[in-house]
Amino acid sequence: MKTIRELQKEIHELAKAKGWYDGRTREPLEYHMLFVSEIAEATESVRMSEPEFCFSANDKPCGEAAEIADAIIRMLDYAEFRGWDMQKIIELKHEYNKGRSYRHGGKAV
Ligand SMILES: [Mg+2]
């Protein structure tokens, strides 16, 4: 199984090969909105009562889980573009979260 670090490198190489970096420099806010657009697609999938994971007529993965995967793929592409090691950062953040208080101090959600 690949590590997150290996996967983010592979995802970024594919994005470059598919032309997403040709002749342009994206700004952080553009990436962030692309993440949000995939989350919106996941939300719409739930609203439409689609299966959690499915294949459309042209064999394209669809459903909430596929859209969440799209969001993660975009995030890992961006992380590699920025030179971040998300394997390490996620592990560090997860360890930090272990020490946080119940519901992080009483938050409702
Ligand atoms: Mg999508």
Image (cartoon, rainbow, N blue to C red):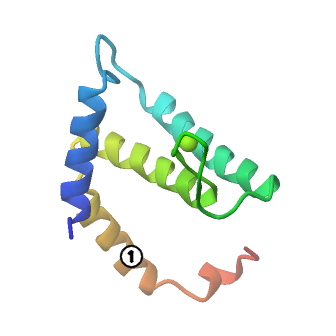
Name the residue: 73% across, 57% down: 50
53 vs 13: above or below: below
Name the residue: 56% across, 35% down: 33
Q: Residue 61: image x %, image y %?
A: 52, 50
- Comparing 74 with 105, the one in front is 74
Please state, as top left, top right, bottom left or bottom right, where the N terminus lies in the image. bottom left
Please give the residue where the numbered disc 1 appears in the rendered image. 94
For residue 15, side relative to residue 48 (left or right): left
**If the picture is divided into quarters, which one holds ligand 1?**
top right
What residue type is disc 1 on?
A: His
Q: Residue 11: image x %, image y %?
A: 28, 44
82 vs 66: above or below: above
Name the residue: 24% across, 55% down: 7
Say which quarter of the image contains residue 23: top left
Please state, as top left, top right, bottom left or bottom right, where the C terminus lies in the image. bottom right
Q: Residues within 10 Å of mark 1 (few under 14, many from 20)?
A: few
25 vs 83: above or below: above
- Comparing 94 with 19, the one in front is 19
